[in-house]
Structure formats: structure tokens, C-alpha cells
Image (cartoon, helix red, strand yellow):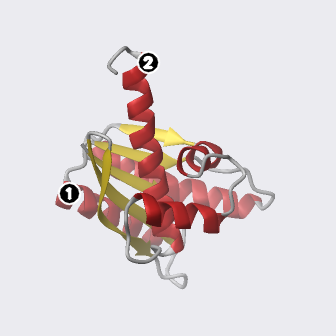
Amino acid sequence: MIILGIDPGSRITGYGLIRKEGNRLIHLDNGGIWTDASADFPGRLAHIFRGITEIIDRYSPDAVAVENIFFSNNVQSALKLGQARGAAVVACVVRNCLISEYSALQVKQAVVGHGKAAKEQVQHMVKVLLNLAEPAQADASDALAVAICHANSVNLATRLKGGF
């Protein structure tokens, strides 16, 4: 099973792809869709949409996992983040991908073992779990963590259904 993890952002949308083979997680790719901060915002959203669409077309993921929006004191930032997330989700829907959503707390719990983990702890565990030579860029690492969370959730769902 190929899983695409997405960490939405209006400046950088991180992506990470893993393959789940039994209990093994294999790193396929990761990176960021960088938008031009000087460009108009609708153009930035289109860039995110096209970037996610290209990744889906290249890897044909079986599942997509997206991090939910966190609450922010800055309303403008939250709105922009929501729109960037929407652009990524629509790209997935247009390509008929199955989408699962996870909170930051769920992702940290799945990757590190507790929901209050620091970003550096998440980056380190992603590196270890996927046997990376060096930590991935922060947004890409977060996206890989979302994909790992989904892989672990699939394992749990299978066990709960009696598929030990």
C-alpha cells in the first residue's frame, strides 16, 4: 500500500510517500511544494493544487492522509492555512483518492508515543522509522509523520476487525 501524507501550508505544503509492506514502512519520496510569497494568493493555491495532482499522478497512492488544521490565534493565518489545505484536499478528491484526516496530537502519538512531542522528536523518529540517512526538511518530515500515522491506524483497524 502506498500512502501519501500531506502537511498543508500556504508557504510550504509538505508531502511524504511511504509504502507499507506488512509491518515494514519504506520511504519512497518526500519534499515540499513551495509557493512564491510575492504571488497572488489564488495563484499560490493553484500551485499547491497542481503540485499535489502531479505527485498523485506520479505515485498513484492507495491512500492519502492529511493533517487537520490546528486552532490559531491569528485568524488570517488560520484562513490561509484552511484554503491551502482545501487546495490539497480537492486535488486528492479530483484524482479519486481515499482521504483520512489526523490531528497533530494523533500524529505525534502514532510516531513518538505521546501527543505533546516536540517537532524535533517527531523529525528524529521519522528518520529512525524510515531509516533515512538524514532528517527530512521540517514540512516534509511532518508529512511523512502523517503517512506513518495512517499506516499505524490501518494496522490498528485491521486488528480491531479481527485480522491479526
Where is residue 47? Give x, y as percent.
38, 70
Q: Which mark is residue 22?
A: none
Residue at 48% from the left image edge and 55% from the top image edge: 145
Q: Return the residue at label 1.
A: 59
Q: Is residue 45 above or below residue 159?
A: below
At label 1, the amino acid type is Tyr
Residue 77 lies, in percent from the top left, at 69, 64
Q: For the residue carrying disc 2, how many other residues have a C-alpha within 10 Å: few (<14), some (14-19), or many (20+)? A: few
Up-down: is 96 above or below 66? above
In the picture, residue 157 is in which quadrant? top left
- Side (left or right) of 1 relative to 116: left
User: Badge 1, how many Cα within 10 Å: few under 14, some, many 20+?
Assistant: some
Q: Which mark is residue 160?
A: 2
Q: Nearer the viewer, residue 93 or 46?
A: 93
Disc 1 versus disc 2: nearer the observer: 2
Inspect this view and state whether residue 114 appears: yes
Amino acid at pointer 2: Leu
Q: Residue at x 81, y 58 (%)?
A: 73
Determine whether the residue tagged by mark 1 lies in a helix, strand or loop: helix
